[in-house]
Amino acid sequence: MNENNKYALVTGGTSGIGLELAKLLAADSYNLIIVARSDGDLARVSSQLKNEYGVDVITIAKDLFERRSAFDLYHDVKARNIDVDILINNAGHGHYGEFLETDLEMELKIVDLNIASLVILTKLFLKDMVARRQGKIMNLSSIASKAPGPWQSVYHGTKAFVQSFTEAVRSEVKESGVTITALLPGATDTDFFNKAGMEESKIYQEGKLYDAVDVARDGYKALLDGDDMVVSGFGNKMQVAMSAVTTDEKLADKMNKQQEPVTTGRK
């Protein structure tokens, strides 16, 4: 068993980018607290990480679509007398479709997951880190934060919040010894598209999907270096650069064409 007393907490840590970040942390001898909704997924990933890296892995099943669960998660960790050295707010969700037709209750849950739970966990763990004058936080933003997103209007809106929020709080605590980093992936080969119902979108059917391993590696380096943000992938860097010199109206129209279903036939 790992005798190091460093702990990192990863939400959404059983698959995709979250799992790859957990592996990188474990390889650097961080003990892990991984959070997800499924007890079965948590048990499977916990066994994998313990066997491969010899670190302590604590699993906590929480549904962060419910903002109360974020408070409960913090209190569960504190009850174990664990100081979290690194917090990675990775859990997130999308919901595909035109806003007039999409499920409002699902979209409100996405706001609670992508924004409310992230804000709660950031505030509570950040206070502890600032009191100790050390710690690191990574928030999963997205290149979606840089452009309006027809067919994913709520998701893009939540990521715009995450990006602005992360940069603002980072500035506030700049002299505290704590750094906050935003990771901005683009379309990545994870279960995100399946969960969001996006299998028929052009961006999934025709676009390039980046490897979650590469995205996690880019994010982890930025986290350790204390950078404010990192855009993962050359194509994504180019897209963000273009968004900085393009009007929001044109960006929205371009994204509309990229994200519409391949079967619509619309021009």
Image (cartoon, rainbow, N blue to C red):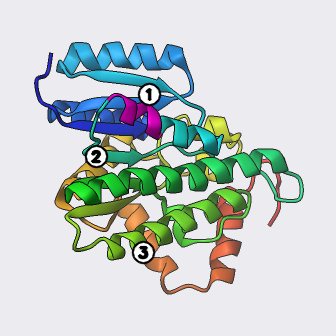
Question: Which secondary structure, mark 3?
Answer: helix
Q: Which residue is mark 3?
A: 168
N-terminal of the pair, mark 1 or mark 2, is 1
Say which quadrant the C terminus sits in.
bottom right
Residue 165 part of the magenta segment = no
Residue at figure coordinates x 24%, y 21% from the top left? 56
Question: Which secondary structure, mark 2?
Answer: strand
Magenta segment range?
74-80
Residue at figure coordinates x 37%, y 50% from the top left? 125
Closer to viewer: mark 3 or mark 1:
3
The secondary structure that most of the magenta stretch takes on is helix
- Image coords of residue 11 (percent x, y): 45, 38
Q: Locate residue 206 relative to residue 46 in the image: left or right.
A: right
Q: Which residue is mark 1?
A: 14
Q: Locate residue 158 relative to residue 140 in the image: left or right.
A: right
Residue at figure coordinates x 68%, y 43% from the top left? 198
- Image coords of residue 87 (percent x, y): 34, 46
Q: Contact (CB < 8 A) between labels 3 and 1? A: no
